[in-house]
Amino acid sequence: MEIGKIIKSNSGFYDVKTQTGQIVRTRARGNFRQQKIKPLVGDIIEFEQDYILKIKPRKNEIIRPLIANVDQALIVMSAVQPTFSNNLLDRFLVNLQAQKIKPLIYLSKTDLTPPTDLAIIHQQLFYYERFGYQVFDQQQMSELKIALSQFETVVTGQTGTGKSTLINRLLPNLKLKTDAISDSLHRGKHTTRLVTLYPFQDGLIADTPGFSSLKFQGITKELLPQLFVDFQYFQPFCKYRSCLHLNEPDCAVKQAVHEQKILASRYDNYCQFQEELAQIRPVYQKISNKKEGKR
Ligand SMILES: Nc1nc2c(ncn2[C@@H]2O[C@H](COP(=O)(O)OP(=O)(O)OP(=O)(O)O)[C@@H](O)[C@H]2O)c(=O)[nH]1
Ligand SMILES: [Zn+2]
């Protein structure tokens, strides 16, 4: 029996990276299908003679793309084309943290950005760094490589920000490595979005399809404040323990915004996200009303 990690799947075949770094191809036995369990890219498995015996419990499972056991996500934000958006960045941060995935930030296209615009973006990103987020750009490729070298990382970001460009820089031989299973097989009519984990040093990297919008998943209005890491420093000083930092009196978070200790855009984005969450709430209310009616 051997242990490995699925790095690619196609039509019932799974390419597995073993503990010694070899890539071998396996299949799932019928009993997985009977149990309606589908091995996912990222799964840690026990296998024997080309067959998967057991899938280890997953740390997490993300849907787009379908992938398991993600440690961290590298958010590729372009400075221009598309224009840098702190709103989108905050959206990514909140969503990733809700899924217990550590976010890292990469700023692309700095070479295309006028110096004054770039300075404004750097100033904003400096704020994020102060609150513990790692930020990289083309100047910090070696630091980025270290941050990626031990983990399973998904590269995410808006369409056209430069995810593939970055991955190609990190993995110049990628073309060779993707040949394990022919990519042409992936282009069937009914295929779900398939994903591949590319070995990078002792870690693995996955490219993800670009997003144009990002909806909140599994986030409630009570959880949202906890996902704003900078708010955590001030929250204990709010009058109410359950303060949502909206209309409550004596709110330390709002005071910190006023004193410019919290970036104004962070608070604006927070309020906007709360509004968005409030709009999807009636669905939950309907369900709970029904339940009450039954009692
Ligand atoms: N000048 C410059 N161009 C870049 C940089 N990064 C990406 N590009 C260009 O931006 C365009 C989009 O880059 P991609 O790497 O395809 O972007 P992507 O995020 O993978 O896009 P999707 O696959 O649509 O999600 C390409 O024309 C790249 O050459 C950069 O740092 N500097
Ligand atoms: Zn408050």
Image (cartoon, helix red, strand yellow):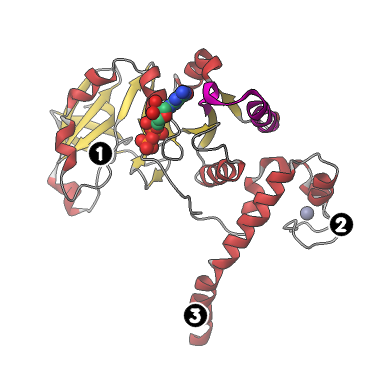
Residue 211 is a magenta residue: no
Q: Earlier in the sequence, mark 3 or mark 2?
A: 2
Q: Which residue is mark 3?
A: 291
Q: Is mark 3 within 8 Å of ligand 2?
A: no
Look at mark 1 in the image and give the residue it sits on: 54
Decide if ligand 2 comes within 8 Å of the CB at mark 2: yes
The quadrant in which the N terminus is found is top left
The residue range painted magenta reads 107-129
- Asked if 175 appears above or below 153 in the picture, the reply is above
Compared to residue 53, the image places residue 237 above or below, namely below
**Measured along the vertical axis of the image, is residue 102 above or below residue 241?**
above
Earlier in the chain: of badge 1 and badge 2, it is: 1
Residue annotated with mark 2: 250
Q: Position of residue 55 (x, y in %)?
A: 28, 39
Foreground label between 3 and 2: 2
The chief SS type of the magenta part is: helix
Give the residue type that dot 1 points to: Lys
Q: Compare residues 221 and 45 and report the one nearer the observer.
A: 221
* Position of residue 20 in the picture relative to residue 120 (left or right): left
